[in-house]
C-alpha cells in the first residue's frame, strides 16, 4: 500500500465519519477524485466551519460531491485490476 497523498485519478471511499459531529451517513461512498483543493468548508450537518484539503468528484453518480481528505481511504490500484483468471488461463 502506497502512502502517497490522495490525488487526482485516485479511487477513494469515505471510511470515517465527520470529524466535527461524527455523522456517518456518507460512509461507503466511493468515487474517483477529479481534483484536490484546500478550501474553507461548512459542515452540512452541524455548521462547523473549517479549512482543510478536500477531494472533488466531477463525474458520474457522485458528481459535485466533495469530501474532506482525512475521511477518505484510497483503494490500492493493484486491487482494482481485473486479474480474475479466465477459463483459458486455468488450463494447464
Ligand atoms: Zn459537523
Image (tube, rainbow, N blue to C red):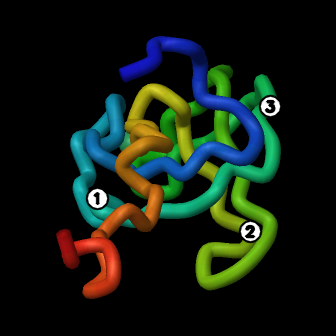
Crowding near the residue tagged with mark 1, few <14, some 14–19, many ≥20 C-alpha atoms within 10 Å: some
As drawn, is 25 to the left or to the right of 44? Answer: left
Q: Which residue in the structure is indicated by mark 2? A: 64
Q: Tell me the residue at 78%/52% (across/down).
A: 34
As drawn, is 75 to the left or to the right of 11? Answer: left
Name which of mark 3 and mark 1 comes first in the sequence.
Answer: 1
Q: Which residue in the structure is indicated by mark 1? A: 27
- The quadrant of the rendering that contains the C terminus is bottom left
Q: Tell me the residue at 33%/30% (across/down).
A: 19
Q: Position of residue 89 (x, y in %)?
A: 31, 73
State the residue in front, 74 or 2.
Answer: 2
Q: Position of residue 54 (x, y in %)?
A: 65, 35
Q: Is mark 1 within 8 Å of ligand 1?
A: no
Q: Which mark is residue 8?
A: none
Q: Position of residue 12 (x, y in %)?
A: 48, 48
Does the residue at mark 2 contact the one at mark 3 (Cβ under 8 Å)?
no
Q: Residue 72, can we see it?
A: no
Name which of mark 1 and mark 2 comes first in the sequence.
Answer: 1
> Where, by quadrant of the figure, is residue 37 drawn?
top right
Q: Which mark is residue 37?
A: 3
Amino acid at each position: 500500500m502506497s502512502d502517497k497523498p490522495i490525488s487526482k485519478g485516485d479511487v477513494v471511499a469515505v471510511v470515517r465519519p465527520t470529524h466535527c459531529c461524527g455523522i456517518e451517513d456518507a460512509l461507503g461512498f466511493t468515487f474517483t477524485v477529479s481534483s484536490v483543493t484546500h478550501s474553507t468548508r461548512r459542515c452540512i450537518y452541524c455548521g462547523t466551519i473549517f479549512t482543510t484539503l478536500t477531494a472533488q468528484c466531477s463525474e458520474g453518480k457522485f458528481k459535485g460531491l466533495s469530501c474532506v481528505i482525512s475521511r477518505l481511504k484510497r483503494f490500492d490500484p493493484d486491487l482494482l485490476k481485473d486479474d480474475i483468471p479466465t477459463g483459458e488461463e486455468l488450463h494447464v
